[in-house]
Image (cartoon, rainbow, N blue to C red):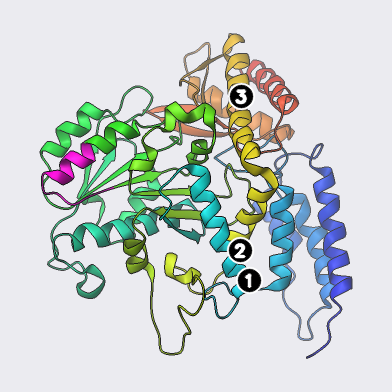
């Protein structure tokens, strides 16, 4: 093979990476440059002869690093973005060097077995049925898609329809029951699956965006035939948990009445809560449902990208996702990762889960859940006591909704001004949301590295900018 100067390239990359990681405690959390400035810094079109790889890496670090958001800084509280656990970083570096196409066991048995073990450990850690199957996908969107594809397969199979062979034209209608304000990834998955948003029936929620069991019971009484129900483990705004035991009871009754039924749990935000004994009351009944989706790159702090799709019915999962071809060597000695997700060629992203679970251990995972919830409550307590803001939600997990109190009553304007000021200063990063028609600031504590000092520093900046913006 042709020789390459791997050492010089790795030296250049590792030096730049370590400088970046070392800067995280003090660097601005968010870049303030505009699009034109960033584009001008990076716009080096390919030349006829190309450029030496070491020079490319050096210049990439020089030109791009100033405009990288410090999402792993411990002070990035926007959206629901996890940080980067050191074990995940190390695994990712090895994966890049190994460059394995993790589609089949025969083509790369090592990473296939590592993913197989990570899947088993995760299912056990979450207390889900031991026979559950797991697919490692790109994120919560594709995890939801994968689980709902399995659901579509099974509820139609139960009425004698093979959707993989015959498609949806002429198929029995599937009713999809969701809560009001269901996450956009659920709606998008339904479009991908050919079911469409008009298949939806919406169930009313309580003040914390929990699906009301009495409202679900009423809706199911009017639904007949194949049914898919979607609930949440950690609402994206309030962080709340649906009543899984009540939903399981209602789903079983609906199924017993002759309606094929599948319940999916959107756990992108807080499925990991099932691993924390302190959250047992919130997650009771979770194991009685049919599928679960989450993001490894959120609370578990695995590097991007990593989503996880879990199904109690492995045969439905595999039927919805697998594909066969004469040129492939499948089912020869181990788990073929391509059978459990929509990707064919893909990165062995489950190895990062393997490494991070080993590093954290059971107690570490539980502690991670409990610590992020504790920090969210620290935010809520300090901001609520300030007199400058109100906490809108009951802080039961890692999400906090904040109403900034403007003297003129334009609370949404003040929220945007506070967030913009803190971003520009670089002390922290927060993102907004429109919740029940009101513009609010949303805090998501998802980084394993965040601590009390990060929260206190962010609160000081928030309150100072709130005073300036009034």
Mark 2 neighbour class, 10 Å CA radius: few under 14, some 14 to 19, many 20 or more: some
Residue 114 numbered tag: 2
Q: Quadrant of residue 151?
A: bottom left
Magenta highlight on residue 342: no
Compared with 182, 455 (above or below) is above
Of callouts 3 and 1, the N-terminal one: 1
CA gap, disc 1 and disc 2 = 6 Å
Give the crowd class for mark 1: few <14, some 14-19, many >=20 residues within 10 Å.
some
Q: Considering only vertical position in the picture, is 341 above or below 120?
A: below
Residue 114: % across, % down: 61, 63
Position of 227 relative to 48 (above/below): above
> Nearer the viewer's eye, disc 3 or disc 2?
2
Residue 5 image-quadrant placement: bottom right
Front residue (pair 342, 413): 342
Check disc 1 and report the residue beneath it.
Answer: 110
Look at the numbered discs 1 and 2 and tell me whether their residues touch, using CB distance below 8 Å: yes
452 shown above or below 53: above
Secondary structure under the numbered disc 3 in the rendered image: helix
Q: Mark 3 to mark 2: distance in Å?
A: 32 Å
Q: Position of residue 231 (x, y in %)?
A: 34, 40
Percent x, y of residue 34: 67, 48
The residue wearing badge 3 is 374
Along the viewing direction, whichever of 417 and 457 lies nearer the viewer: 457
> For this view, does 89 lie left or right of residue 277?
right
How far apart marks 3 and 1 lie (CA) works out to 38 Å
């Amino acid at each position: 093979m042709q020789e390459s100067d791997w050492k010089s390239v790795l030296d250049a990359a590792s030096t730049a990476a370590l400088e970046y990681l070392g800067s995280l405690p003090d660097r601005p959390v968010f870049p303030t440059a505009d699009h034109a400035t960033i584009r001008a810094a990076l716009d080096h079109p390919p030349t006829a002869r190309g450029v030496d790889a070491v020079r490319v890496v050096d210049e990439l670090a020089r030109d791009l690093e100033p405009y990288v958001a410090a999402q792993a800084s411990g002070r990035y509280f926007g959206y629901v973005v996890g940080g980067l656990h050191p074990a995940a970083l190390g695994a990712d570096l090895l994966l890049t060097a190994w460059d394995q196409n993790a589609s089949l066991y025969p083509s790369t048995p090592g990473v296939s077995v590592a993913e197989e073990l990570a899947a088993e450990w995760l299912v056990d850690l979450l207390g889900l049925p031991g026979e559950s199957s797991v697919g490692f996908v790109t994120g919560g969107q594709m995890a939801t898609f994968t689980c709902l594809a399995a659901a579509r397969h099974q509820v139609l199979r139960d009425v004698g329809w093979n959707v993989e062979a015959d498609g949806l034209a002429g198929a029995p209608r599937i009713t999809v029951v969701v809560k009001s304000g269901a996450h956009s990834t659920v709606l998008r998955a339904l479009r991908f699956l050919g079911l469409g948003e008009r298949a939806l029936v919406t169930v009313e929620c309580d003040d914390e965006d929990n699906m009301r069991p009495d409202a679900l019971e009423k809706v199911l009484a009017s639904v007949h035939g194949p049914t898919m129900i979607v609930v949440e483990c950690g609402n994206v705004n309030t962080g709340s948990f649906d009543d899984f035991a009540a939903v399981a009871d209602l789903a079983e009754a609906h199924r017993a009445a002759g309606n094929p039924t599948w319940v999916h749990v959107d756990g992108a935000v807080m499925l990991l809560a099932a691993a924390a004994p302190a959250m047992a009351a919130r997650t009771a009944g979770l194991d009685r449902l049919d599928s679960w989706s989450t993001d490894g790159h959120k609370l578990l702090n695995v590097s991007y990208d990593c989503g996880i799709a879990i199904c109690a019915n492995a045969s439905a999962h595999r039927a919805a996702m697998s594909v066969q071809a004469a040129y492939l060597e499948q089912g020869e000695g181990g788990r073929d990762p391509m059978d459990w997700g929509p990707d064919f060629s893909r990165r062995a992203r489950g190895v990062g889960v393997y490494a991070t679970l080993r590093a954290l251990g059971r107690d570490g995972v539980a502690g991670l859940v409990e610590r992020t919830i504790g920090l969210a409550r620290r935010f809520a307590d300090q901001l609520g006591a300030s007199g400058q803001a109100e906490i809108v939600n009951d802080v039961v997990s890692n999400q906090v909704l904040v109403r900034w109190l403007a003297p003129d009553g334009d609370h949404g304007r003040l929220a945007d001004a506070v967030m913009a000021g803190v971003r520009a200063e670089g002390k922290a990063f927060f993102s907004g949301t429109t919740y029940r028609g009101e513009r609010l600031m949303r805090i998501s504590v998802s980084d394993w590295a965040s601590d009390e000092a990060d929260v206190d520093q962010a609160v000081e900046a928030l309150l100072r900018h709130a005073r300036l913006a009034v």
